Amino acid sequence: MRPIYWGVIWFFIGMVGIAFSVIAGVITGVSEITGEGEVNPILMVFVYIFGILFFFSLPVAGIVELVLWAKTLEN
């Protein structure tokens, strides 16, 4: 399968992860309003992982596609 397809797949996985991160953030924010807690560090790790996956999956896949295309032109 071509790299751009993998990039799109990982993009949507990252998007779903960001949606869950936003939901968890809202729940955490509501609990902080009531004075019950802090942000869970594990939650923050997932927010960063899914954010990186979301933002960099398509550009990296696009660069790989361009490199593969350039290699086919050389042959």
Image: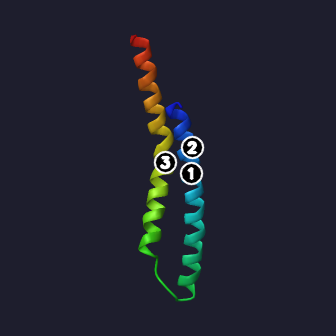
Q: Amino acid at mark 3?
A: Phe
Measured Cα–Cα span from mark 1 to mark 2: 6 Å
N-term mark: 1 or 3: 1
Res 60 label: none
Q: Which amino acid type is shown beneath numbered disc 2?
A: Ile
Which residue is drawn at the image coordinates 56% and 83% (left, top)? 31
Residue 59 coordinates in the image, percent (x, y): 47, 38
Position above or below: 63 against 57:
above
> At 55% across and 77% down in the image, what residue appears?
29
Q: Secondary structure at mark 2?
A: helix
Marks 2 and 1: in contact by CB < 8 Å? yes
The total of numbered circles placed on residues is 3
Residue occupied by mark 2? 9
Residue lying at 43% horizontally and 23% vertically, measured from the top left: 68
Tag on residue 13?
Answer: 1
Q: Residues within 10 Å of mark 1 (few under 14, many from 20)?
A: some
Q: Is residue 65 above or below residue 72?
A: below
The foreground one among 38 and 13 is 13
Residues 29 and 72: in front is 72
- Say if 52 sits above or below 44 in the image: above
Label 3 SS: helix
Gap in angstroms between the C-alphas marked 1 and 3:
11 Å
- Mark 1 or mark 3: which is in front? 1
Q: Nearer the viewer, residue 32 or 8?
A: 8
